[in-house]
Amino acid sequence: MNIPMAILVPGATIVAVLGVVGWIVTTWLRVKHGYPLENSWGKAVYPRSSDETMERVKLLSGENAQLRAELSAVKERLATVERIVTDSSFRLDQEINALRGPAN
């Protein structure tokens, strides 16, 4: 099977160009969304640890702790409401039956 050069060269060129364009788009998306660029060994090319980044991490950590505390409080309140809703009717039935007197 002999593939003519008129088809092979343009086909290989198109594949190479698409590969380069894909690499450029991937790199652009990584930079746009804040992911660090990596070299061929998987290590970050520019691990940024500026003062602004550290301040942002501190703020997010504080907000995370606050939200966790708030979630804990909401869970406790929900447990209390569930206890009131489920226990109240059962206890009320027992009190009504006690007021009616013993069943003879």
Image (tube, rainbow, N blue to C red):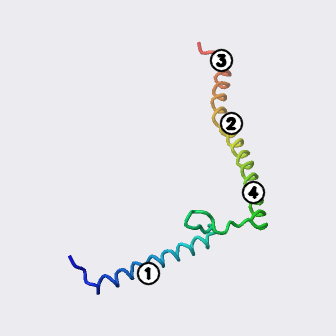
Kind of element beneath mark 3: loop
What is the quadrant of residue 76 in the picture? top right
Amino acid, disc 3: Gly
Mark identifier at residue 17: 1
The mark lying in front, picked from 1 and 3, is 1
* Quadrant of the rendering where the N terminus is positioned: bottom left
Q: Residue 75: which quarter of the image? A: top right
Furthest toward the bottom, the residue is 6
Q: Amino acid type of disc 1?
A: Val
Residue bearing mark 3: 101
Q: CA distance from mark 4 to mark 1?
A: 46 Å
Q: Residues within 10 Å of mark 1 (few under 14, many from 20)?
A: few
Residue identifier under label 4? 63
User: What x and y, as percent, mark residue 55?
Assistant: 78, 63
The x and y percentages for residue 39 are 58, 67
Question: SS of the residue at dot 4?
Answer: helix
Give the Cα distance between marks 3 and 4. Answer: 57 Å
Q: Is residue 102 left or right of residue 64?
A: left
Q: CA distance from mark 2 to mark 3?
A: 26 Å
Seen at 75% across and 51% down, the residue is 65
Q: Earlier in the sequence, mark 2 or mark 1?
A: 1
**Which residue is label 2 attached to?**
84
Looking at this view, is 35 or 64 the one in front? 35
Image point (61%, 63%), residue name: 43
Nearer the camera: disc 2 or disc 1: 1
Q: Earlier in the sequence, mark 3 or mark 4?
A: 4
Cβ atoms under marks 1 and 3 closer than 8 Å: no
Sequence-first tag of 4 and 2: 4
Q: Position of residue 24 (x, y in %)?
A: 53, 77
The amino acid type found where label 2 is placed reads Ile
* Circle 4: residue type: Glu
Q: Look at the numbered discs 3 and 4 and tell me whether their residues touch, using CB distance below 8 Å.
A: no
